[in-house]
Image (spheres, coloured by chain):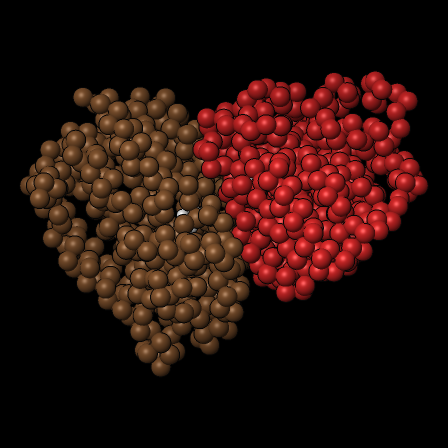
Amino acid sequence: MNEQRRYLPLQSTNQLKRTMGRYYALSKYHRLWGKPLGRKLAWVTSGAPVELLRAFNIHPVYPEQYGAICSTNKATVALCQAAEGAGYSQDLCSYARSHLGSVLRPDLAPMQGLPKPDLLVACNNICGTVLKWYEALARHFNVPLLVLDTPFLPGDLTPQAKAYVLEQLKGMVSSLEQNTGRKLHEKELEKQMNQSAAITTLWRDIRRMCRARPSPLNAPDLFIQMAPIVVLRGAPEGTAYYRKLKQEVSQRVAAGQGALEQEKVRLVWDNIAVWPRLFGFFRLFSERGACFVTDTYTGGWAMEISQGDPLESLAATYTEVFLNRSPEFRARQLIELIREYNADGFVMHSNRSCKPYSLVQEVIRKKVTRETGVPGLMIEADMADPRAYAEEAVRNRVQAFLELFE
Amino acid sequence: MLQSDEGKGPLELLLEESALRGTRAGERYPGCRFFGYFCSYWPEELVLAAGMEPLRLFPGPGSATPAELPSYTCSLARGTLAGALRGEYQDLAGVGFAHTCDTMQCLAGIWPETAAPGPTLMIVPPVTLRAPGAAAYFRAELQELARGLSKIGGQSAGNAELSQALELCSNIRRLAAELDELRPALPSQVIAALLRAGQVMPRREYAAALAGALTELKQMTEEAHGRQRILIAGAVLEGDSLFRLVEDLGGRVVADDTCSGYRHFAQPAGEARSDPWDELVRRYSEMPLCPCRHRSLEERPAYLAELAGSRLAQGAILVIRKYCDPHAWDAVPVAEELRSRGIRTLVLELDGAEVGGQERTRIQAFLESLSSSAGGV
Ligand code: SF4
Ligand code: SF4
């Protein structure tokens, strides 16, 4: 196939499939092994302090990742329609809609939906949507909802914001102690934090290898390879997987092997993937030798875990995530990526589903171009709902943009 | 203090201010410095304490599509940003954002980069208002904001200034509550306009005019026999056309929980605190919830159901501004709760505050369904 010649598949992907398959099988059959072991199952947002949950032996499951799975399985439209039928507006986040659809209509959902939660944990460091989404889930399942409110940071983390998040984390510890009947062991939390640091460091190292020319990875690789860092952050099997991946990627770099057969243009990606068209969409670029050498989204999981007292470190780490910060911060971040990765341009996915990510992009785009001199393209689509994707218009815009580099 | 139009009655003045939406505030009240803000969680008291007048920014008529915001942004954000780009807020001493929804968060972020010549301030109130540490955090945020406002206003917002401002605002809120009680007996659009006036004109003038208008209004009251009694809830409504339409079609808005309506003024029950900062925290932590904040899972649906019940509302209209996530989310459990208590509920999506032919048909059918099921009151 044409695509195969142009695009170099990663050997590790087979192991990735096994690792993720095992995680979802464990999740699915949690009721069989979790109950006897006294381990609860929690649905958690991608930005929740999972280290704390793991320290309580809680098995975390991620509805946001499931939203992406629904999309790549072409189940999103039917599931969203189920949620829309129950009154949820078509303009709400499509991860939330498709996941709620899977709760209402498991018969339409991949894996027949996620295994039912014993508790829900939401952290609003990524958006306001998660709070409303988890409120809806808490009403539906009638299980406890723990919310960690991480104030948005217009500037730097203030002492009052840090103290507030810390107080809530302490409250969360008590709630979890009550809920699980276990005591928190500081040592266990420290261990979890160290494991998290280990996996995020690996993820960061792998990403940094893409500074090489040609880049060993392209955006679809990053988006596929991010799966373990989302759901297995802190789990040894996740770390083991990234060790292997790191090896393969460094071999590529050593051999001067790029993700694309011929890398002509280096780009940075901003926002979540267009899941329903992951390969088709990025092929519009790769067939013209344009490689996405890094991105802001999967980079969100390469955060440095702050040092020091574990709870304080959690407070700072989770409040300072990039989606919880000003456009000024986000522009700076993009500018640094462009410089660090020697990019020739950037592409922003104006993602109808994700307002906090998208509504500031145009201002960021102008600022970044002003400061770096590299052009940026804006494409309107949706991360999961294919109904918002206009193939022809996108193709034309991409073509015109790539002509700038010829 | 008003420069022209002497001899106008208080009611007439308030209706005029409301129609102007603050657009000519600087020229009408040259002695005042106005400070723009967006949301009901913005602490007006601090603006007053810093020697300025709070002015809520409402989008102008018509649809606006500033290039800085994508098409799937609510028209409140698009409209106000467009207003700023047209230079409508140039005379303001500054603009303040209270963090609420994702859209406001983004608008606050891009505002200084695009639109505003003056300073922009932001306060981030806690979302989970009763979480451990929330009150202390909120107090610190308010004090930091007070420092920022004092610099702009040139008057230090200390305890004495704050206490005075709290008194003025709670006086206004008492008057607004009196006005709200008159709803069943007065045209709905008049109440909506009078409440909006209280967000776009100097507060002392407003308090005085509202007190005067209330005397006038009490003489105008007339029991609304045969009208369907409606609760309206939703985000900001910058105009009264929805209220007018309900009236035209034979209904009456007997309860209102819109951001720019009574929710903006609702004072929490309970004792005021003696420390002015604690009192400020109490007010903004305990006022009726908007969908962007959380105290408990069932509070908002239950509050609205009880409000509808206490005003004997037969039906409810939940207004969702297109692309407004928080209200769209809440419409589901709120509608469910209201319906479970026998209150018919219409979820109405609007682009802005203006209603057109389509809405007329839907509201007409809705009101008819109410009279056929229960008969007007
Ligand atoms: S996609 Fe955006 S709006 Fe949806 S859950 Fe993620 S951060 Fe929130
Ligand atoms: S609450 Fe709704 S109407 Fe208000 S700014 Fe946010 S999205 Fe817009």
Q: Quadrant of residue B308?
A: bottom right
Q: Residue at x 62, y 28 (%)?
A: B61
As displayed, is residue A387 above or below residue A199?
Answer: above
Rendered red, the chain in question is B
Q: Residue at x 32, y 78 (%)?
A: A33
Q: Residue at x 61, y 57 (%)?
A: B334
Q: Residue A76, position in %: x, y? A: 35, 53
On the rendered image, what quadrant is the C terminus of chain A found in? Answer: top left
Q: B149 and A377: which one is in front? A: A377
Look at the image and tell me whether residue B42 can be seen.
Answer: no
On the rendered image, what quadrant is the N terminus of chain A found in? Answer: top left
Q: Quadrant of residue B118?
A: top right
Residue farthest along the bottom direction in this orientation? A36
Q: Residue at x 50, y 53 (%)?
A: A88
Q: Residue A254, position in %: x, y? A: 8, 42
In the picture, measured across the screen, residue A233 lies left or right of residue B202, that is: left
Q: Residue B204, position in %: x, y? A: 82, 33
Q: Residue B113, position in %: x, y? A: 49, 26
User: Color used for chain A?
Assistant: brown
Q: B63 and B48: which one is in front? A: B63
